[in-house]
Image (spheres, rainbow, N blue to C red):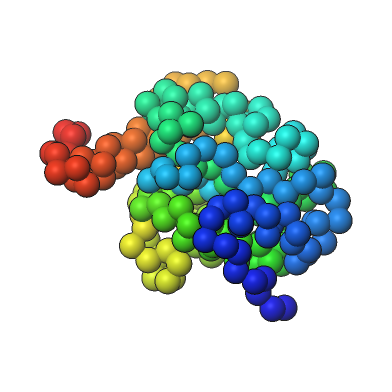
């Protein structure tokens, strides 16, 4: 299948192109395409799996229960969702019954994600959940072993970027405990490391010193 035509240089052009996309069957059941929320000039991008029912209705990613938890976790790590992050999904349309996107659906949406990353140009990327890890880095399984680690990729569209997988907030909703070693506590630790890396990056770009450990 031919790649879609490149949109204009703006993210508005990308959103318009996505709205007309019919590269896979998910277009038939969507209410609207869900492109992004947050600051398009942020140095940190968060990539999830795909929209759910509430996201499909509102046209914004991570606005349901898992999104509210994500916002809480980011705030606890000192990250402002309106200023510090740009949030999107690897797949822009809701799969039926919130099922996991297929490999074909992720591949069909990949050109849009590549253009989105190129437009925002984030040096730091957080991959929310196993599907994002698979869709972006091609790594299947093993997120519990890889979470919290900075990874890199030789792929041209990811070259020079640092990527960290973390547990998906919808998975965290299954657990209420926040004791040491719990999924929520581990994710909180991971996001503090993301915040530390972002602060160090911003300090280096402004000629300041990196924060301490």
Horizontal side of residue 20 vs 186, given as left or right? right
> Measured along the vertical axis of the image, is residue 128 above or below residue 27?
above
Query: Quadrant of the image for the N terminus?
Result: bottom right
Q: Quadrant of the C terminus?
A: top left
Q: Is residue 17 above or below residue 86?
A: below
Q: How many marks?
A: 0
Quadrant of res 154? bottom left
State the residue at coordinates (72%, 49%): 33
Of the pair 157 and 95, the residue shown nearer to us: 157
Q: In the rendering, at what x and y percent does residue 36 appear?
A: 59, 44
Q: Residue 20 sits in which quadrant? A: bottom right
**Residue 80 falls left or right of residue 29:** left
Q: In the displayed structure, would residue 54 be above or below residue 42?
A: above
Residue 170 or residue 48, whichever sits in front = 48
Residue farthest to the right, as pictured: 28
| 190 versus 135 height, above or below | above
Q: Position of residue 176 (x, y in %)?
A: 57, 21
Residue that appears at 42% across and 23% down = 76
Left or right: where 187 falls relative to 171: left
For the point 41% across and 55% down, the residue is 121
The answer to whether residue 150 of the structure is visible from this angle is yes
Using residue 203 as the reference point, say whether residue 131 is left or right of it.
Answer: right
Residue found at x 61% / y 57%: 14
The x, y position of residue 51, in whole percent, is 70, 44
Residue 144 seen in this snapshot? no
């Amino acid at each position: 299948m031919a790649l879609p035509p490149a949109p204009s240089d703006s993210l508005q052009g990308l959103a318009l192109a996505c709205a007309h996309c019919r590269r896979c069957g998910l277009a038939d059941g969507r209410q609207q395409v869900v492109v992004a929320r947050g600051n398009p000039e942020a140095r940190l991008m968060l990539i999830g799996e795909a929209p759910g029912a509430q996201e499909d209705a509102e046209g914004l990613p991570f606005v349901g229960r898992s999104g509210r938890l994500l916002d809480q976790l980011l705030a606890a790590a000192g990250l402002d969702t309106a200023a510090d992050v740009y949030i999107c999904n690897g797949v822009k349309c809701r799969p039926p019954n919130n099922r996991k996107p297929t490999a074909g659906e992720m591949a069909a949406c990949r050109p849009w994600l590549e253009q989105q990353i190129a437009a925002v140009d984030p040096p730091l990327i957080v991959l929310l959940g196993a599907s994002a890890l698979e869709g972006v880095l091609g790594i299947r399984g093993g997120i519990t072993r890889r979470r919290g680690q900075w990874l890199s990729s030789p792929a041209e569209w990811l070259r020079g970027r640092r990527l960290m997988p973390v547990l998906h907030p919808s998975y965290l909703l299954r657990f209420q405990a926040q004791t040491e070693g719990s999924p929520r506590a581990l994710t909180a630790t991971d996001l503090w490391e993301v915040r530390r890396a972002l602060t160090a990056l911003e300090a280096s770009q402004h000629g300041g010193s990196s924060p301490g450990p």
